[in-house]
Image: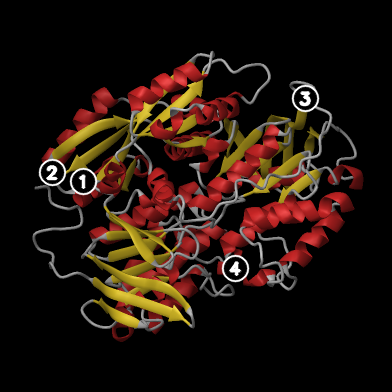
């Protein structure tokens, strides 16, 4: 029997956290219902579930912040309230002091937790170096990007060397590079013996956990390792690509409609999810379903059989338990079609210089009507500056732009009426009700009276807010606010739609529905330009552009970008994973090595030469290689690889 990844011969077998029959009531509302689970020493334990599942309430009780209504909760063998000094807790809200520097925030936390001076210096260097914050230690916390703030908050939570670390959605709004650094540090601290429990809306992150529980309405729906949850689904995922799209467009949408309309689909197909250049078909009968797909279209298709994702598990388990309104369609007004290939958004060698700083350097891109274009990059890459130039909010230092087909007067009021914009930060008014906000936006966008009520009803139905119209908007959770904000941005059926991280903090089910709506607008001819830090959802885009240090360094379809990556991604399991992780990060570029549950993911340029070297390095350190197999690059792997390789080239050029 294989030893579990969080166990060792010297570790105590007693759980760090024990939860028995936990109940928490708020008045008549039962937020947590009879929870039972345990977290083992050194484990990276994950909680996933939609908004309102009870994850934050559970964390508040585990952290000793509130008491349970009923049941027993023990942390380190005693009540959490009595052991809070040994618990690190990173909440959803930003908890640092904005007028203190990075180093001063760490000193403050260390003082409260009575950390000795020598240990403080050692930990400060270790954690700031791991998070790439050491060179910014004098910068005020208020001047940090969202990703840097979250990384600093984690460093603060680790300063007292807690035995238990609780992280409540710690990477919301954090860019992919910072997220990778964040999770790599978690792998290091669990190797040091810290037990970690993390709640996350990002299921690609959840893949890194030792075990998971899936919660819904305060109850546990599933519990087990990532492999157990996926195998328990007893299904396969078919990636379907059309190799010769028809001239009229909408090929994938037509294929999806045909598949659902076929009588055999009800027994063979469990789920279909549309992405930018493929369909994912979930089925327990892959061979029969392949035949069904082949008969549904005259166009040549390629079909790859893959294991299901955690999102497949999440959606399949909760389907039917969470109400989603598929029937209320947006009341589109018919409009004249744009000529084939017409550009809605374009940049021709645009640059933006602020003083001596070149924020954007010679960027060119093109977005056609009906296309979804994803602009991706780490914090500081120049995405937001580029978007502000493209939508006419900022004048470029040089270069030309096209917006809604126009080349001049890009800041005119008439042109702005044709745009929709959802900013990175919530843009509605917290002190107005939901209905008042929607009526305000109808007025701003001059929505005709005959359309106003119908479109407000559509927003309420698709946001799940029917009957809540008179609630103050400020009382809504973050995920609900994002859905409402999206609805407000499209009240006027925009010709061009800019979405800056539209699904930040939104759970997987709500995220899927938002992308269904985005695709509906694209199918109607709207040009969509979107930024996101969540690389799995970037798969919904038809074209992607990757920015690094103000430059566009890669462009193409999601599949094309993944297939163009040099080298190979390997999944390797070792007899001592933590020792192998530390060894390989010392001997390879650190970005090439990451922990995923009970294995390491390693990027190599020449697998025939480098895999034997990895095996020899491990054997020399007394570590056995249990299994090694190639994996296809994910979009996140591709992003990290592109960004890191481009950064090396930039450093070499500067040298």
Asked which secondary structure carries label 3, the reply is: loop
Instruction: Give the Cα separation between the discs numbered 3 and 1.
Output: 53 Å
- Circle on res. 623: 2
Asked which secondary structure carries label 2, the reply is: loop
The answer to whether 127 is drawn above or below residue 25 in the figure is: above
Q: Are marks 4 and 2 in contact (CB under 8 Å)?
A: no
Instruction: Give the Cα separation between the discs numbered 3 and 4.
Output: 43 Å
- Measured from the top left, where is residue 90 in percent x and y? 43, 69
| Residue 348 as seen in the image, left or right of residue 250 | right
Please name the residue shown 86% across and 41% down the image: 410
Looking at this rendering, what residue extends furthest in the front direction?
263
Residue that badge 3 annotates: 342
Other-residue count near label 1 (Cα within 10 Å), few / some / many at <14 / 14–19 / ≥20: many
| Residue 607 visible in rendering | yes
Q: Are marks 1 and 2 in contact (CB under 8 Å)?
A: yes
| Residue 620 as seen in the image, left or right of residue 116 | left
Q: Nearer the viewer, residue 186 or 112?
A: 186
The mark total stands at 4
Q: Which of the two discs, 3 and 4, labels the residue nearer the N terminus?
A: 4
Instruction: Give the Cα separation between the discs numbered 2 and 3.
Output: 58 Å
Asked which secondary structure carries label 1, the reply is: helix
Instruction: Give the Cα separation between the discs numbered 1 and 4.
Output: 37 Å
Other-residue count near label 3 (Cα within 10 Å), few / some / many at <14 / 14–19 / ≥20: some
Instruction: Give the Cα separation between the discs numbered 1 and 2.
Output: 7 Å
Q: Nearer the viewer, residue 205 or 509?
A: 509
Residue that badge 1 annotates: 580
| Residue 261 as seen in the image, left or right of residue 440 | left
Q: Are marks 3 and 1 in contact (CB under 8 Å)?
A: no
Query: Which image quarter: residue 442?
Result: bottom right
Q: Which of the two discs, 4 and 2, labels the residue nearer the N terminus?
A: 4
Q: Which of the two discs, 3 and 1, labels the residue nearer the N terminus?
A: 3
- Measured from the top left, where is residue 327 in percent x and y? 63, 46
């Amino acid at each position: 029997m294989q030893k579990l990844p969080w166990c060792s011969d010297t570790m105590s077998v007693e759980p760090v956290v024990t939860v028995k029959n936990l109940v928490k009531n708020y008045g008549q509302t039962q937020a947590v219902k009879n929870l039972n689970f345990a977290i083992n020493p050194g484990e990276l334990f994950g909680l996933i579930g939609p908004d309102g599942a009870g994850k934050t309430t559970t964390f508040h009780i585990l952290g000793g912040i509130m008491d349970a209504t009923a049941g027993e909760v023990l942390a380190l063998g005693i009540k959490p309230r009595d052991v809070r000094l040994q618990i690190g807790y990173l909440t959803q809200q930003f908890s640092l002091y904005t007028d203190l520097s990075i180093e001063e925030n760490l000193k403050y936390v260390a003082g409260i937790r009575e950390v000795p001076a020598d240990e403080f210096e050692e930990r400060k260097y270790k954690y700031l170096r791991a998070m790439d914050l050491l060179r910014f230690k004098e910068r005020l916390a208020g001047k940090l990007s969202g990703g840097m703030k979250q990384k600093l908050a984690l460093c603060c939570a680790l300063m007292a060397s807690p035995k238990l670390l609780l992280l409540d959605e710690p990477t919301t709004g954090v860019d992919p590079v910072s997220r990778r650094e964040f999770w790599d540090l978690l792998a290091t601290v669990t190797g040091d013996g810290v037990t970690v429990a993390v709640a996350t809306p990002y299921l690609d992150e959840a893949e890194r956990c030792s075990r998971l529980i899936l919660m819904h309405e305060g109850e546990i729906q599933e519990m087990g390792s990532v492999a157990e949850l996926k195998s328990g689904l007893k299904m396969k995922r078919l990636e379907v690509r059309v190799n010769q799209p028809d001239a009229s467009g909408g090929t994938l949408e037509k294929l999806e409609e045909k598949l659902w309309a076929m009588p055999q689909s009800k027994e063979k197909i469990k789920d279909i999810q549309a992405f930018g250049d493929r369909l994912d078909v979930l089925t327990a009968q892959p061979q029969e379903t392949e035949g069904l797909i082949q008969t549904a279209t005259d166009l040549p298709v390629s079909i790859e059989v893959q294991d299901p994702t955690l999102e497949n598990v999440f959606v399949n388990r909760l389907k039917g338990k969470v109400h989603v309104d598929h029937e209320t369609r947006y009341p589109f007004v018919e409009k004249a079609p744009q000529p084939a290939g017409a550009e809605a958004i374009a940049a021709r060698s645009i640059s933006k210089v602020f003083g001596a700083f070149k924020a954007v350097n010679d960027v060119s891109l093109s977005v056609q009507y009906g296309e979804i274009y994803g602009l991706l990059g780490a914090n500081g890459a120049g995405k937001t500056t580029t978007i502000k130039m493209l939508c006419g909010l900022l004048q470029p230092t040089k270069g030309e732009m096209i917006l809604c087909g126009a080349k001049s007067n890009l800041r005119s009021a008439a042109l702005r009426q044709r745009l929709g914009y959802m900013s990175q930060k919530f843009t509605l008014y917290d002190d107005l009700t939901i209905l008042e906000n929607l009526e305000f936006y109808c007025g701003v966008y001059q929505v005709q009276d005959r359309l106003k009520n119908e479109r407000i009803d559509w927003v309420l139905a698709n946001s799940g807010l029917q009957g809540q119209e008179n609630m103050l908007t400020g009382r809504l959770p973050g995920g609900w606010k994002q859905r409402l904000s999206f609805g407000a941005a499209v009240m006027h059926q925009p010709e061009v739609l800019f979405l800056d991280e539209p699904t930040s903090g939104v759970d997987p089910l709500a995220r899927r529905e938002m992308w269904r709506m985005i695709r509906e607008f694209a199918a109607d001819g709207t040009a969509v330009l979107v930024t996101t830090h969540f690389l799995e959802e970037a798969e919904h885009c038809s074209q992607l552009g990757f920015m690094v240090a103000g430059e566009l360094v890669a462009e193409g379809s999601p599949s094309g970008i993944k297939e163009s990556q040099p080298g190979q991604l390997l999944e390797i399991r070792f007899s001592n994973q933590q020792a192998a992780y530390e060894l390989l990060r010392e001997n390879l570029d650190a970005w090439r090595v990451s922990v995923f549950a009970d294995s390491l993911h390693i990027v190599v340029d020449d697998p025939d030469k480098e895999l034997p070297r990895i095996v020899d390095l491990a054997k020399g350190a007394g570590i056995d290689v249990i299994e090694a197999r190639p994996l296809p690059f994910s979009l996140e792997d591709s992003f990290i690889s592109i960004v890191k390789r481009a950064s090396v080239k930039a450093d070499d050029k500067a040298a």
